[in-house]
Amino acid sequence: MNFKNGFAILSFFILQLLAGCASTSFDVNKSLDYCIGQSGKTSSGLTGYDSIPRSIANGQTKWRMINYKDWCSGFYPGILWYAYEYTKDEKWKAKADSFSRALTPLAYNPAYDHDLGFQLYCSFGNGLRLTGDTSYISILLAAADTLATLFNPTAGTILSWPRDIQKLGGHNTIIDNMINLELLFWASKHGSSKRLYDIAVQHANVTMKNHFRPDHSSYHVIIYDSITGQAIKKMTHQGYSDSSMWARGQSWAIYGFTMCFRETQNHAYLDFAQQCADRYLRDLPKEDYIPYWDFNAPGIPNAPKDASAAGITASALLELSTMVSDTTKAGKYRAAAEKMLASLSSSDYQSGNINDAFLLHCTGHKPNGGEIDASIIYGDYYYMEALLRLKKLQEGKNIIDKL
């Protein structure tokens, strides 16, 4: 969280010329104000901290509520922290703290799956960054230790779904798991063992080796032999097919390897993040820069879109643009992110008066018939994160710092 990226400042005015305001057909502050208004509507309808918003089905107006154990439980507290970061209003800080603390048992109970980074770093991690509240530190350190219990040193990766290890035929690792490495990196630098850093690096290296096709598109799931550690099956769970590029999975890859470069300064991760990003941008719909749920989905252009993947990718590309020394390429990433955010900030994708979420047209699990063309909380989270990052870049600030 204390990472200072020199490119963010030194190349700021060059990037403005290459990718800047001319390509931004929306007002970032207006979009953030919109998020605050929608958050207020959601907040007014909540009665306690044990029910957390997750999604609103297409055609519905009410949030589907979850408890703290759901993998999406950290995104709503994260949104509240972002609301506090933007407004500096203490009411959002109090709400964010309360919803975050409701997740505390996750840090101390046996790991149910790999999502502790999503759950606790998006909540307590943002809280620590914005407030410096030291009571959050012990919770985050415990969460990192709990996540590390899922690491298989033979395979070299973290087990994603312990509940499915027999059904899937081995040690399973999904591309989403890359995002949870940030919790391990943080813990290793703030009082925990260097072993957590080494686990994160090994997971990233093995994922880079096994999780991608020659064109740098990502598989969703890799199955490893639990005894030998060899990759024995490459498949999808939420994409169209084992050979297709699931949009959100590719977004996790771009975001995850960008973050790994920030935390390690290993240029192999920076190069790989660019290769994943270039593959994503190559076939992205150019009319609005919002992907279909799978790049190879049948029925395109009538297949469902996934606005959540666009939000994740926009946030990742904004950070990636500050790391790339080639200003032309940095400008390309910045411009693409701004186009994504401009589309997401339009009436085509904002929920407005349709429901209390930020975005429409997210797709969660198309093969399973779940959350298709819906509003989903992680789509809102990464959309708001990307807006805050863009605002910081426009003001010449580092995207990781406080606004």
Image (cartoon, rainbow, N blue to C red):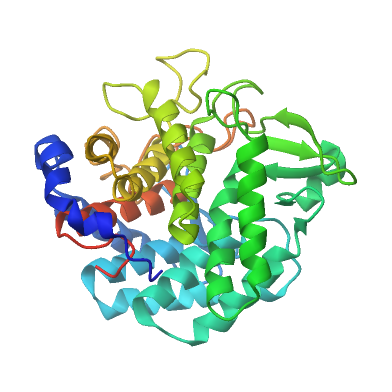
- Residue 333's x, y, as percent? 29, 38
- Residue 107's x, y, as percent? 65, 73
The correct choice, above or below, for 9 with respect to 332 in the image is below
Please name the residue shown 26% across and 21% down the image: 287
Q: To which quarter of the image does residue 230 belong?
A: top right
**The N terminus: image quadrant:** bottom left
Please name the residue shown 58% across and 21% down the image: 244
Q: Is residue 22 left or right of residue 151?
A: left
- Residue 382's x, y, as percent? 39, 50
Please name the residue shown 86% across and 37% down the image: 169
Q: How many marks?
A: 0
Residue at the extreme right of the image, as rendered: 227
- Residue 348's x, y, as percent? 26, 32
**The C terminus: image quadrant:** bottom left
Nearer to me, 84 or 316: 316
Q: Is residue 124 visible?
A: yes
Please name the residue shown 30% across and 71% down the image: 84
Residue at the extreme bottom of the image, as rendered: 134
